[in-house]
Amino acid sequence: MLFDLKGKRRRAVQGTYILLAVLMGGGLVLFGIGGGSLNGGLLNAFTGGGGSSTGNKQIQKRIDNAEKQLAANPQNQAALQEVIRDNYQLASLSADQTTGLFTADGKKNLRQAADAWQRYLNTNPAKPNAVLANYMFQAYGQAGLNQPANAQKAAEIVAAAQPSASAYLRVVQYATLAGDKRTADLAGQKALELAPKGQRSSVKKLVQQAKAVGAPTSTQTGTGTTGG
């Protein structure tokens, strides 16, 4: 149930992208959430690597070594995680430093990361790596591969590992975009439960906004007039 960027839908996408920026930026600060390793690692991926050609070659070398390990053992979770992490880092280093948008070359790395991520999930890890899930949430987001259903699944992994109002707001947003109304409703309830009492009204508004910008109109769906 992935949505596409056609016609009037562009306005909704623009609004959603703005909302995502609020949730990832101001929202995290507002709710006092996300100061731990998940967001720290993501931030470092964007700003801490320095995009030198030497550094990129070293990252690519690690990817190549991991791929050799996978050729011998396709179920090697450590090697799959290396491929995911390093391809995401390469994509981040080539991203536009002012907008945060991934470049065409960066998206190639994101697709490689996404392939490794799906292979990693197919190994049925007992507890999927939440840091990598956070990276893949960004990779599947609208600045990257624009795959809401996959972004939703990654957001759910992050929210389960590090429950917070902000984390569940991201699930609301992408579940709505993916057409999963039930999950969006449940995540919205969870976001309200986790929000500090003094901030619940703000969280409630953000939940409503996330659903509004992600929901298709009746003329766009062709399958019904109500969300879901």
Image: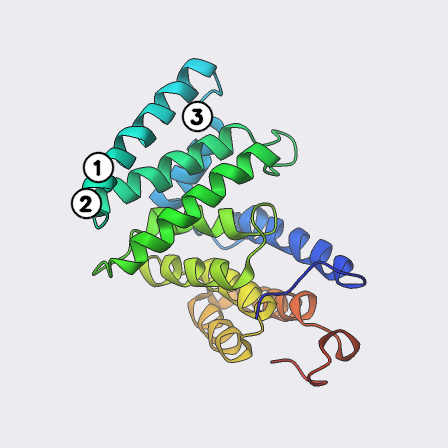
Q: Closer to the camera, 144 or 65?
A: 65
Quarter of the picture holding the N terminus? bottom right
Between marks 3 and 2, how big is the CA–CA gap?
32 Å
Q: Nearer the viewer, mark 1 or mark 3?
A: 1
Asked if the residue under mark 1 is in contact with the one under mark 2, i.e. CB atoms within 8 Å, the reply is yes
Vertically, is 64 above or below 16? above
| Element class at badge 2 | loop
At 21% across and 37% down in the image, what residue appears? 69
Q: Which of marks 3 and 2 is nearer the N terminus?
A: 3
In the rendered image, which quarter is residue 224 located in? bottom right
Q: Mark 2 sits on what residue?
A: 73
Q: Which of marks 3 and 2 is in front?
A: 2
Residue 86 in view in this figure: yes
At 61% across and 51% down in the image, what residue appears? 142
Vertically, is 115 above or below 9? above
Residue 77, given in percent of the width and then of the height, sits at: 23, 47
Callout 3 amino acid: Gly
Residue 201, given in percent of the width and then of the height, sits at: 59, 69
Between marks 1 and 3, how big is the CA–CA gap?
27 Å
Q: Closer to the camera, 15 or 51?
A: 51
In the rendered image, which quarter is residue 6 located in? bottom right
Callout 1 amino acid: Gln
Say whether residue 116 is left or right of residue 14: left
Callout 2 amino acid: Asn
Q: Closer to the camera, 117 or 10?
A: 117
Vertically, is 174 above or below 226? above
Q: Mark 3 sits on what residue?
A: 48
Vertically, is 132 above or below 68? below
Q: Mark 1 sits on what residue?
A: 69
Asked if the residue under mark 3 is in contact with the one under mark 1, i.e. CB atoms within 8 Å, the reply is no
